[in-house]
Each structure stands twice: as C-alpha cells, then as structure tokens.
Image (cartoon, coloured by chain):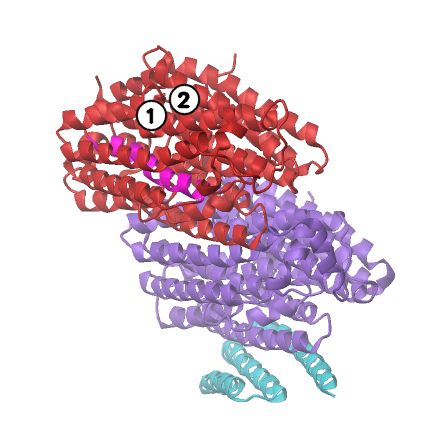
Chain colours: A purple, B cyan, C red
Amino acid sequence: MIDWLALTVALPLLGSVLAAAIPARSPGIGMATGLLTTTAALSVGVLIAHAGELRSDLGGWGVPLGIALQADGLSGALLVMANLVALGISAYALGYFASGLRRHFWPLWLLLWSALNALFLAADVFNIYVTLELLGIAAAALGALTGGQAAIAANLRYLLVGLLGSMTYLLGVAILYTGLGTLDLRLAAESLTPGPLAWTAGALMLGGLLLKAALFPLHFWLPPAHAQAPAPVSAALSALVVKAAFYLVLRLWIDLFASVVGPGPGILLGALGAGGVIWGSWRAFRSERLKLLAAYSTVAQVGYLFLFFPLLAAAALPKQQELLGALLLLALTHGFAKAGLFLSAGLLQKHAGHDRIAELGPAIRSLPAVAFAMGLAGVALVGLPPSGAFIAKWILLTESFAMDRWWWALVVLVGTLMASAYVFRLLANAFGPAAHQDAVELGGDVQTEKIGRMIQAPALLMALVAVVLLGLGAEPLWGLLGSSSP
Amino acid sequence: MATQLLFGLVGIILFLLGVWSFLAHRPLLRKLIALNVMGAGVFHVLVAVAYRGLEKTPDPIPHALVLTGIVVAVSATALALTLGQRLEHEDD
Amino acid sequence: MIPDNILPAAIVLSSLIPGLFIFLLDEERHVLRTVLNMAGALGKLVLVGLLIQGVYEERLIESRWTLAPGLDLVLSADALSVLFVTLSTVLWLVTTVYAVGYLEHSSHRSRFFGFFSLCVTATVGLALAGNLLTFVIFYEALTLSTYPLVAHRGTPDSAQGARVYLAYTLGGGVLLLTGAVWLRSLAGPVIFTQGGMLSDLAGVYDGQLIAIFFLLVGGLGVKAALVPLHGWLPQAMVAPAPVSALLHAVAVVKAGAFGIIRVVYDIYGVVLAESLGLLSVLATMASITIIYGSLRALSQDGLKKRLAYSTVSQVSYIALGASVFGPIATIGGVVHLVHQGVMKITLFFCAGNYAETLGVHRVSEMNGVGRRMPWTTLAFTVGALGMIGVPPVAGFVSKWYLGLGAAEAGSDWVLLILVASSLLNAAYFFPILFRAWLADPPASWPEEHIAARRLETTGALLWPPVVTALLALVAGLFAAAPVSPLEWAELIARREYGL
C-alpha cells in the first residue's frame, strides 16, 4: 500500500533539498516534484471519495507518541484544490522568474508546498503549530524574494505578525494539553468539556489563527505583503496560505471546540467578517495598483468566509452540512479565482512594466487571453453566476433569510455591489481604442516584456475551474463532506 | 506542586510581557526579543505541564514540544534577523 | 429524435458552442465566423421548431442539472417560454445577418460575435428557465455578456455608457437576487407554475410577499426600463446599431418584461397578485413609464435616442397587460412581447442603415431620405405605424386587446393611457415620416459611406429590416391564423386562467 498521505508531504521536502543542492536544475526538479505531489494529492482525493477518510500513522507509532496524518472530506477537498493551484503556479513560475531569482524560488516554494500539505493533513494540534511555522517562514522568505526595500519590510512584518500568532496558538496548545493530556484532534475532541480551560485554550488558539487568517481587524499585514511579493508568490499567499489558516479555524471550530462554541462567538466572528467585507472591498475599490486591489480583495473574501460562522453555530445538523458545503465551495472557488487573478496581474505587470490600474489599458488589450482570465476570475470574486461562488452565496443568503438572520444577507449583498465596483473598474480597461493606438502607447514603457503563450495558460485554466467547473459541477462536494464522520 | 505552579505562572507572565513589548516597541530587535520572551514563556508553561510528581519521570511529550519550539523559534529569528539586515543595507 | 430531456439544453448550447469557438478565431476569418454564427442560428431554429411541436402536444420537455443539494438548474418549455424563445431565435438570425454587414470595417469582430452569441445563449436560457434560480443565473449572465457589446467601440462615450449600463443592471441584479433568496427561504424551490405557486403562503406572509414582489419587479424593472430605473437605456445608445437592435427588441429589455410576466403569472398568479393589491401598483408604474417615455421621445433629435425612449414607453405595455386582471389584457401584453420586438428591431435596423450609409444620426438630418433610401424608409414607416397602432400592422392587434381587456376589467383610466400614448407616438413618429417622404433632401448627406448603386445600401443591411417589417405586417394581417403570435398568446392566457 502506498502511503499517499505521507508522499504529499515527503515529496516536496525531498524536492526542496534537491533543488537547493542543484540550483542549475531547480526548475526541472521543482516542476517534476510538483507533478508527483499533485498526483499523490489527487490519489488522496479519490480515496477519500470512496472510503470517506484516510489516516496514516507515520513510522507505525500510534497515539499519543506518534505523528499521524489524516484526511476527511473537508481537508481532502482543500488538499486537492491547494495542490492543483500550486501546480498551476509552478507552471507559471517556470516562465516567470529570470535565472537569478530562480534558484532561490524553487527550494523555498517546495518547502512551502510541503508545509501546506502537512497542514491540511495534520492530525494533532502541535503538528499544526509546526506546519504553521514552516509555512510562515517559507512564505515570508518567498515574499521578500525580489529583495526590494518595500518587499522586505512588508514581509518582515508578515513574519513577525505570524510569529505572534503562532506563539499565541502554542500557548493555547500548552493549556489544552494541561487539561486533556492529549494532542490528537480526535481524542481531544472527545474529552473536551466546556469550562475555563477550554475557553482559554480556545481563545488563544483561535486568536492566533485568526491573526494568520487575516480576519478584520487583524488583516493589516496582508495587503502590503501580498502586493509586494512576486506574482506567483502573491497567488500562493492569497489563495493558499491564508486559506490554510482559515481551514484551521474552521477545523477547530467544528471538531475540537464544537461543544464550547456557540452563537455568541459565532456572531463575533460574523461581525468581524462583515467588517472585513466592507473595509476590504472599499480599499480594493480605492486601490490604484492592481496587486494591491487583489490583496484587499482577499481581505474581503476572508470576511465572506467568516460570515458563515454565525449561521453554522445556530443551525441544526442537516442545515449545518448544507452550509458547510457552501462554505467549502466558496473557499475552493476563491482559491482558484484569486490565483488566476494574481497570475494574470503578474503577466500584465511584466508586459506593461507597472501595475497602475489607470494605465493598464493598452497592456490588457494586447493580451486578450489574460484579459479573459481576469474577467472570469473577477466574475468568480464578485460571486456572479455561473461561478461556484454564486451558488455558495445563494445558499448563504437563503439560509440567513430562513433563519431570520437577514442582516448577514445584507452584508453579502452590499459586498457584492462593492466587489462589482472594483472588479469592473478594472475590467472596463479591456475595451478601448483600436489595436494600433495601443502599440504606440505600450512601446514607450520601461522594461516591458513579450508574454509567451504557455505562461498565459495557468491563469486561464484556474479561472475556468472557478467559474465553470465549480459552478456547474459542485454537487459532489456535499457528498464528500457527508461521507466523512461528523 | 508549588514549583509547578510557579513555573506555569511565570511562563504566563513572560508571555504577557512579551506580547506587550511586541506591541509597544518599534525597533525590530526589540520585537524579536519580545517574541523570544513569549516563546520562553510558553516553554515554561510546557515544562510545568510535564511535571508528574516526584515519583514518576516527567511527561516526555511537552519536553518534545519545547525542543521543537526552540528549533522553530531559532529558525524564525534567524530569518527575521536576515531580513532586518537586508533592510538596513538597503537604507545605506 | 431528440430526447425531451436534452432538447432545452441543446437549444441553449446551440449558440454557446459556436460562440466559444468564435472567440478563438483570428480577426481575418470572416467566412468561418459567419458560418459558425449562421449554423448556430439555423440549428437553433430547427430545435425550436421541435420544441413548439412538443409544447403544443403538451409533452413534458425539461433538462435538469443539479448544482447543489436542493438547487437544480432547470430548463423547461411551456407556452410562454416557447413564445420568447421563438422570438429570440428568429430575431437573432436576422440580427446576425445585419451585424455582419454593419461591422464590416470594424475591429475586434471575433470578440463582438463571441459575446453576441453568449448574449443570445443567456436570453434563450432565461426564456427556458423553469425555476427562479435558473432565471436569475441566466439573467445575470445576460448582463455580463451584453456589457462588452455596449463597450465595444472603446471610445470614452462607449466606456461611460457601458459603465452606466453596468451600474444599473448589476444593481438590479442584486435586487432580483434579494427577492429570489427571500422567496426561496419562505416557499422552498420557486418553480414556475401556471397559475402561481404561492397560494399556500397567502394570509400569513402577506407583508413579506408584497416586499418580495417589489424587490423582484424592481430588479426586473431595471432591464425592462420601468421609470425611474430606465436611465441606462438612452445612454446605452452608444453601442453599435446591431447591439441596440438586439438589446431593445430581443434580449435585455424583453428579458425584464418577460421576467415580470413570469413573476405575476407563474410565481404569484393573477389571483394572489390582485388580492395583495400588487397589480394596481404595477399598472401605475407601467402607465407612468408609458407616458414619460413618450414625452421624452418628443424632445429628442437623435434618432436612436428617440427610439430608445420609445422603447422605454412601449415595453411597459407588456407590464400593463400583465397588471390588468383578465385574459384579454393578458393576451394583449403577451402578444406585444412579440409584436413590439419585431417592430422595434425594424426601426433600429433602419436607424443603423441611415447612420452607416449616409451618416444621418439625427431626425433633423432626415429630410428627403425616403427618396435616397426608399426601401429602408418604407420598412421604417411600417414599424412606426405599428408603434402608433395603425392597422394592419401588428401593433394595432396588441393595443386592441389591451384596450379591450382594460375595458372589460373596468379600468377606464388604462384605456385613457393607451389612447394618450398612441397620440404621443403619432406626435413623435409622424414628423419623421413627413420629413423622410415629403421634405426636400439636402445638397449632400453628412457622410455618404455607401454610394447608391442598384440597391440603396448593402444587402446585409437592407434585407433584415425589410424582412422584419414584413413580419410585423404579416403578424398583424394574419393574426387570426392558427400559427400567429396572437394565437399562441391566447393559448398562454387560456392555460394561465384555466379556461
């Protein structure tokens, strides 16, 4: 029996070491590792679709001493999404980086990939800490890759804030262990009883994670860090790293602390989420640079994800499953759409030499495939049909009306309008005067680059997944969730 | 028993001190030290948790956690310092 | 031949697939592009024919696809959807021919025809929508696919017009969505059912039902250009003429009106709507729009602008027909869906012809144009007379039924509105006709792009308006024939009122 779970973690680690050891070959090593890892992740996904759950005790050591990896419907779906997006980013990065940065990118990128997979598959709370730290370190290093002043400053802050979050989380773990004597997620969930211990541990652990998930108002570190990083890294940061932290919050909320949390904390998270939606969308609308717009859009999207919490907390079990599926769908769609947007933005930036939205018209018009990808990604981000986000939104809206909590619906609707504003402000540039005029405008810029056909593909593919595949083919997700144990 | 409590309390105080310092002070080095103090606080708590009385050996799991935590903290501090140094260079 | 559960999906796909291919074509591949367009259009026509047959035989024709637990995408055919689908398909065919001719020297044609096909896909999709979710999905898809068409020319004016268009339609979309999810949370899946499906909820939820009605009609009213939500329409005139033709005769405006009919008849049902007092409010809104649109049209010198305001006014006849209680008014409103479409598209085609051939954009420049372009102006005359309500053009039939229905329902003031608006229509159309036929032409036209040869303009530009004008004439003359739009509207009314 092949231990696919372990492979998803081990392969990128191995690849990272190899890529560091043989810098000249790092792109090839990186891409090959990526393909193998994605295959492993897909196998995990398929197995979960059949069996409902997977667990692997590394080295044969069981609890409480051993490190275990486990996957259920929720983590499996996110794992598959993360790996597919990472593969797309890898393909893109092949063409994106010049030879200098290349040797630094691949080892770090594979390290991040390994940490990401390990995080989704982590079965105990301490392992989560380790993977969080690894993820944070790799991400900060990647973000600062270009070596520019602003990039380093922004990512240093990201690192420090991340460390604050993880330390807080660790304290929570320590307190949890004091009371329960176990670190395993499942065992801990069984023995946890509501009380001051659970409350403190929960607050600390969730608080640390919320900082990493960039929930308003703990989001302040995100926009500069994501906007300054090189495009493939921004894509990974916004689409995957933030999503990982969110996944952990969700996991702790519905599994470990299920007996402790209630409508109160749920409403708090929802209210903060609402703040994120409004503030993030507003700042995105006011952004003059494309990558900053995309970064603030992530803040807004994270807010949307947290709007589900008050409803989850108040719903009965069957409704909870429905909401959970919608939440998962939204997270998946956003992952693909955001990656598509950042990759497109990167290409436009390379082509035009800058990313000032007001002046990107000629660049957008000379790259129709990129414009189309951006359009699709924008549609998914606003939550218009036929994207997966629309369906998720529909369910969220219907349920908030059905549960007499229509104010959450109001936030979603206002957020939709604001998102339309900033997305279409960007897309309007796709329509302009005839082609020859653009060529004149484009020629005069500094450091413009020709954009090959191959590198445009990943962005387009991811946007298509977000809008078409997840829009029309999302139904199996609920089956996936339902087949794993509650 | 009292030792355990002492360790735990000190750990929490250190943690809180670290948080305050992190939020209150601007210079990078101060923030890094603050983070390490926070870490030290958490390790104290873990060491306290490991105590199982005079008869039995301490629980190895929290000790493993402390070791791992130290390694992680050192790596992260190293990265932060490197980035900080690059920033200094850029300023010149 | 084609299974009943694939037919509706096939109709939608028949323009989606060519459209997607067209996006990938290089600019120079005119022939292939036209072939794809026409193949799609003709294919769709054939499929729609099969659909008509099926609905007449009262077979269940439905395509269903599950999007999520409890959320199905449903495309089904009933009498009303068939009416709208047929209209869209026939007019799309004609507009495609016209667009090929009109855009001959334009840039970005692959992009244009790609979105053009997507636009028709969305229209057909919402025509065939079997539940509110599906309708909302295609309604929004319509917004997304028409925006690039309005912005096509890329000039600052186009960008502005497109921006306004988007702001209005996305805002309307949010209103519609709000109403839809609210209703869904109360009533479960909202399936379009003849006679309405909300009767169980009457009494307890009246307040909410009324609020939902206004949200839905508000959202739909943006596209249907109900005053005061009509602001985007005159601004959208910056689009090329084929787009204006499509938007005003077939796709966007009709989609809104069609939606209102669905809400009143197949969600609420006339009885419930009447008892909640909603019909009178709708009638008032429609009447205000009718008069306001006509008044604004009077003062416009720009030909397309005048026609735009005329559309604002005319489409509300449909809403008016829906809001007067009684089968005869229903027939009038529903059949006007078809008649107005055919007549208006004729007028817009002609306006496009004047602009393309002679550079004539304003009414004041139209002196004697009838001598230079007789066939176009003849088509224009037919369309204009129909708008006014002069027999035997189709417009007369719809107005007759509307008036009769109003009289039967005892709404004398509606009758008054109809008469007043007909007079206003005459007031802003007759001067154009006088100028065109009887005034002396100027020494030279503003910009004669296409010189007069055997035909007054290119074939692709000339035939479409002539054909649609003929259709308008035929629909009126042969209204009593078994396959006329009128007969079909009567079928719909009969099934709605259970007669």
- Secondary-structure class at tag 1: helix
Dominant secondary structure of the residues highlighted in magenta in the image: helix
Q: Is residue B35 magenta?
A: no
State left or right for residue A252 relative to residue A47.
Answer: left
Q: Amino acid at mark 1?
A: Gly
Residue beneath label 1, please? C395
Q: Residue at x 75, y 58 (%)?
A: A96
State left or right for residue C266 relative to residue B5.
Answer: left
Q: Residue at x 69, y 31 (%)?
A: C30
> Which range is magenta?
C302-324
Please tell me whether residue A202 is drawn above or below residue C417 in the rendered image.
Answer: below
Residue beneath label 2, please? C472
Q: Amino acid at mark 2?
A: Ala
Where does the image place residue B13, in percent across and percent down from the top left? 47, 86
Q: Residue furthest left?
A: C410
Q: Is residue C308 magenta?
A: yes
Asked whether the residues under the numbered discs 2 and 1 touch, taking CB atoms below 8 Å apart as contact, a structural biologist would say yes
Q: Are marks 2 and 1 on the same chain?
A: yes
Residue C260 visible within the image = no
Q: Residue at x 50, y 54 (%)?
A: C160
Q: CA distance from mark 2 to mark 1?
A: 8 Å
Please tell me whether residue A225 is drawn above or below residue C370 in the rendered image.
Answer: below
Crowding at mark 1 (Cα within 10 Å: few <14, some 14-19, many 20+): many
Where does the image place residue C33, in percent across and percent down from the top left? 66, 30
- Secondary-structure class at tag 2: helix
Crowding at mark 2 (Cα within 10 Å: few <14, some 14-19, many 20+): many
Where does the image place residue A257, in percent across and percent down from the top left? 41, 61
For the residue pair A232 and C69, the one nearer the viewer reads as A232
Q: Residue at x 36, y 42 (%)?
A: C297
Q: Earlier in the sequence, mark 2 or mark 1?
A: 1
